Amino acid sequence: MLNFRHPKQKQVLLIALPMIASNLTIPLLSLVDTAVVGHLEHAWYLGGVALGSSLISLLFLLLGFLRMSTTGLTAQAFGARDNHALRGTLLQAGLIALGLAFLLLLLHPLVMPLVQLFSQASSEVLQQAGIYFQVRIWSAPAALLNMVLLGWFLGLHNARYPMWLLLLNQSLNIVLDLLFVLGFGWKVAGVAAASVMADYTTLLVGLLLVRRLWQQRQLAPLTLGQLGRLTGYGRLFALNRDIFIRSLCLQGVFVFIAFRGASYGDAIVAANAVLITFLMLVSYALDGFAYAAEACTGKAVGAKDSSELQQLFIIMAGWGLVLGIVFSLLFWLGGTTMIGLLTSITEVQKNAAHFLPWLTALPLIAVWSYLLDGIYIGATKAKAMRNSMLLSFAGFVLCYALLQRLDNHALWLALSVFMLLRGLTLGWPLYRRGGDYLLKN
């Protein structure tokens, strides 16, 4: 499974390793955010950042279809050697991203009143969450366009540019985080402002890299008239719609955990925030291989190569098993120490250690859903992803509803069931039909 001399293995690693290196800086930023705020005098600062960042995740990450659809369509155009589709996908996806960003900025004043109406968090946590949200939302245009650029680069099997952009974004974010919070004393507002400035800087550099790659591939310029043509938008909108529903369910699960955990007290919501931060560490590492799966699957689908898909399945299964074991061992052996590095608040440390066994088991359960997502995105099987997610989300809701008397344990059990169902519902069609399932329109 892990034969490093196999040409397909090398192709996967050339994309996965740079993306893992850069992706690990994303949870590193979250770790720094949590550590900086977690050492302030009150737990509500940490709870406020957790709740505020969950809201931004709901609004930004559920729009992650901008990256996913761009990667899948670009990779297929790359495999089919269709330069017209390559340029059209980038520019049409960029136009959609700007439209959605404008809509977010227009409607954002409605968000916090709704949160205050439905959330059972303390007034202090809600106040800090509002401060974070009101600053961070202004990065919407840059954040959404950055998703499109990342997807386009990955679809072209170019992992270097996304790596540079992610490293730039996260390193600048960390530096500004420390400056604004510890240096200027801006607290929660400083965490949000650092992200805004980093996103716009990354966008500027990303556009310069697009220009460079555009010239290297000798892509023809596109006029405004061509950009406005409806050809291509239909498939893009349909693909984005299904991935949006999938992303809405996924982000809804984590937002529900943040909101419901807040009802168990400030120390519980803060402890959950610490553990979810570690889970994000796993997801971003796995995303490196998921991105490779997207690019390689899309290229194989564009070239109509079923045998190449079968080789990719075997490679991804091997990596999934290895990575799941490694992360579970990491949390089992060093989880308590890692918690202590993030927060000095005794009550938060105690609660996080109590629920740590759930986190220890999750990598082995969740790894398959992340890698299978990459395969399905590359094949642009958005409808199948949507249906899988709806079923898994229903399982999450049912599990929590039946076992909510277990309080916070019920949240972590429901999350485990959710991840297990995702892997099973995505894996079964591939187990039965193999690569031919992905090649069928």
Image: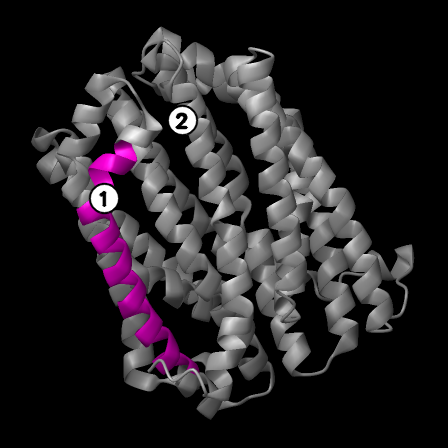
Q: Secondary structure at mark 2?
A: helix
Please tell me whether residue 327 belongs to the stretch shown in magenta: yes
* Highlighted magenta segment, given as a residue range: 312-339
| Percent x, y of residue 434 | 36, 85
Q: Earlier in the sequence, mark 2 or mark 1?
A: 2
Residue density around tag 2, few if under 14, some if 14–19, many if 20 or more, within 10 Å: some
| Percent x, y of residue 275 | 28, 36
Count the marks: how many?
A: 2
| Percent x, y of residue 35 | 40, 26
Report whether residue 134 is seen.
no
Q: Secondary structure at mark 1?
A: helix
- Seen at 33% across and 53% down, the residue is 390
Residue density around tag 1, few if under 14, some if 14–19, many if 20 or more, within 10 Å: few
Magenta stretch, main secondary structure class? helix
Q: Which mark is residue 375?
A: none
Q: Quadrant of residue 386?
A: bottom left
User: Image quadrant for the N terminus?
Assistant: bottom left
Q: Which mark is residue 334?
A: 1
Amino acid under disc 2? Ala
Viewer-proximal residue among 42 and 143: 42
Viewer-proximal residue among 134 and 404: 134
Q: Which residue is mark 2?
A: 35
Residue 131 vertical position relative to residue 354 in the rendered view, above or below: above
Please tell me whether residue 353 belongs to the stretch shown in magenta: no
| Percent x, y of residue 61 | 50, 43
Report whether residue 200 is seen.
yes
- Seen at 44% across and 23% down, the residue is 36
Amino acid under disc 1? Gly
- Seen at 69% across and 49% down, the residue is 96
